[in-house]
Image: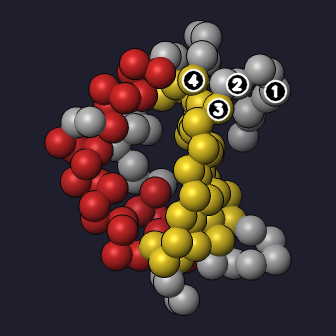
Amino acid sequence: MNITHGFHATMTAHPGKADELIAALLTAPSLPNDDCVVFLVGRSAGTPDVVHVTEGWTTEEAHTRFFNSAEAQAFTAGIQQLVADSHYTDEIPVGGKSAF
């Protein structure tokens, strides 16, 4: 499957809320979406309140369509109470590997 659109988010959780944020992210509604082919959640080794999410989507249109859905909007609104600060960047994946 081709990945033509990517997304990287860095979120700083409110103090003591990173575990809850990570647990919520690992139930994200994009996980069962066939157009979301990469969904990785990581935590900063040096700053445990910092959480990273990397996504790979089949197309930018699929990503936009999903994030405009009521389900995605509700999920995003629900995790906002856990997030003190965030930074989002769209990407064009060029290669690499994801295996667990």
Q: x, y (%) of residue 62?
A: 39, 21
Locate the C terminus by quadrant: top right
Question: How far separated are the C-alphas under marks 2 and 1?
Answer: 8 Å
Question: Which numbered disc, 2 or 4, marks the residue that appears first in the sequence?
Answer: 4
- CB-based contact (under 8 Å), mark 2 and mark 1: yes
Task: Assign a secondary structure to mark 2.
Answer: loop
Are dots 3 and 2 in contact, CB under 8 Å? Answer: yes
Image disc number at residue 96: 1
- Identify the residue under disc 2: 93
Place of residue 25 in the rendered image (x, y in percent of width and height, measured from the top left): 46, 57
Residue 19 in view of the camera: no
Foreground disc of the pair 2, 1? 2
Image point (34%, 75%), residue name: 81
Residue that mark 3 sits on: 91
Q: For numbered disc 4, what is the local secondary structure?
A: strand
Residue at which label 4 appears: 5
> Label 4 sits on what residue type?
His
Q: Which of marks 1 and 3 is nearer the N terminus?
A: 3
The answer to whether marks 2 and 4 mark residues whose Cβ atoms lie closer than 8 Å is yes
